Image (tube, helix red, strand yellow):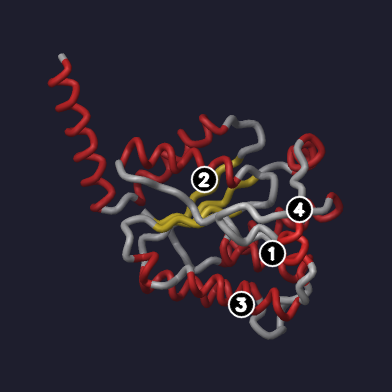
């Protein structure tokens, strides 16, 4: 299963990704996770020190642009797609939305413009992982602002004045995407548990033959365990 989950900061992408990972482990077996490290300065799986985070923030736009470009290309390598599952949060769509707005690079017509670059990334994905599903997690502007005030990210990038624009841009990139397997979810008035149930229903038509075989194997294995314990 190959998923790319996108949405504005505070829409709940990380929470949903964790819920999907739990669902996949239970349903498909094995271990599942998401690469969720695309918003500057959160560029690694592990936590950095405050000094390290600040050093990333202080990088010039030119250095940030190059790092993120190589960062994205690296995550399209065969070493990732050789695995049965390769799931990401944000990825090139975070860059398409946030880079021109907050990072100082990637605007339309600029070198490696990030909306154009997202289409480049998608062409590669369509070639090496044509079963990839793109998921847009929507949320109302009012709810986004409520979450920003209630639980602000220490190095959050989204600004109050930009909420509507950022939501519109994510939807625009989703609509422009060359990936054709798509799901839309909305976290505004839905709990994470209900949201993952909606995901489970919507992902069903996009499950691959391998995914379905894993589900059957997992079910049979669980049934055999129940018989042994009865």
Q: Are marks 3 and 2 in contact (CB under 8 Å)?
A: no
State the CA–CA distance, disc 3 to disc 1.
Answer: 12 Å
Going from the N terminus, do you reach mark 2 or mark 1 first?
Answer: 2
- For residue 77, above or below residue 220: below
Question: SS at mark 4?
Answer: loop
Q: Residue at x 75, y 37 (%)?
A: 151
Residue 124 circle label: none
Q: Which of pointers 3 and 4 indicates the residue nearer the eye?
A: 4
State the CA–CA distance, disc 3 to disc 2.
Answer: 26 Å
Q: Residue furthest top?
A: 230
Label total for image: 4
Name the spot of residue 101 as percent of width and height, x first.
Answer: 78, 66
State the CA–CA distance, disc 2 to disc 1.
Answer: 20 Å
Name the spot of residue 18 as percent of width and height, x first.
Answer: 51, 42
Q: Are marks 2 and 1 in contact (CB under 8 Å)?
A: no
Q: Residue at x 76, y 59 (%)?
A: 51
Question: How packed is label 3: few (under 14 Cα within 10 Å), some, or many (20 or more)?
Answer: some
Name the spot of residue 162 as percent of width and height, x first.
Answer: 81, 55
Q: Quadrant of residue 214?
A: top left
Q: Which residue is mark 3?
A: 116
Question: SS at mark 1?
Answer: helix
Going from the N terminus, do you reach mark 3 or mark 2 first?
Answer: 2
Question: How packed is label 2: few (under 14 Cα within 10 Å), some, or many (20 or more)?
Answer: many
Question: How packed is label 4: few (under 14 Cα within 10 Å), some, or many (20 or more)?
Answer: some
Going from the N terminus, do you reach mark 3 or mark 4 first?
Answer: 3
Q: Which residue is mark 4?
A: 155
Closer to the camera in the image, 183 or 68 = 68
Question: How packed is label 1: few (under 14 Cα within 10 Å), some, or many (20 or more)?
Answer: many
Q: Residue furthest right?
A: 161
Q: Which of pointers 2 and 1 indicates the residue nearer the eye?
A: 2
Q: Which residue is mark 2?
A: 17
Q: Which residue is mark 1?
A: 97
């Amino acid at each position: 299963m190959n998923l790319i989950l996108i949405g504005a900061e505070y829409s709940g992408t990380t929470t949903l990704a964790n819920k999907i990972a739990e669902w996949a482990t239970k349903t498909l077996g094995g271990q599942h996770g998401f690469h969720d490290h695309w918003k500057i300065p959160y560029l690694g799986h592990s936590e950095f020190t405050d000094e390290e985070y600040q050093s990333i923030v202080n990088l010039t736009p030119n250095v940030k642009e190059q790092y993120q470009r190589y960062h994205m290309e690296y995550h399209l390598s065969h070493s990732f797609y050789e695995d049965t599952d390769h799931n990401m949060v944000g990825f090139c769509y975070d860059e398409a939305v946030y880079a021109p707005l907050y990072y100082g690079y990637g605007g339309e017509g600029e070198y490696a413009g990030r909306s154009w670059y997202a289409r480049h990334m998608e062409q590669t994905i369509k070639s090496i992982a044509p079963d990839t599903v793109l998921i847009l997690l929507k949320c109302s502007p009012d709810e986004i602002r409520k979450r920003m005030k209630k639980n602000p990210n220490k190095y959050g990038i989204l600004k109050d004045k930009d909420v509507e624009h950022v939501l519109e841009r994510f939807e625009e990139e989703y609509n422009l995407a060359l990936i054709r397997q798509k799901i839309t979810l909305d976290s505004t008035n839905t709990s994470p548990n209900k949201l993952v149930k909606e995901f489970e229903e919507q992902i069903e038509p996009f499950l691959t033959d391998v995914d379905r075989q894993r589900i059957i194997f997992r079910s049979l294995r669980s049934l055999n365990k129940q018989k042994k314990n009865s």
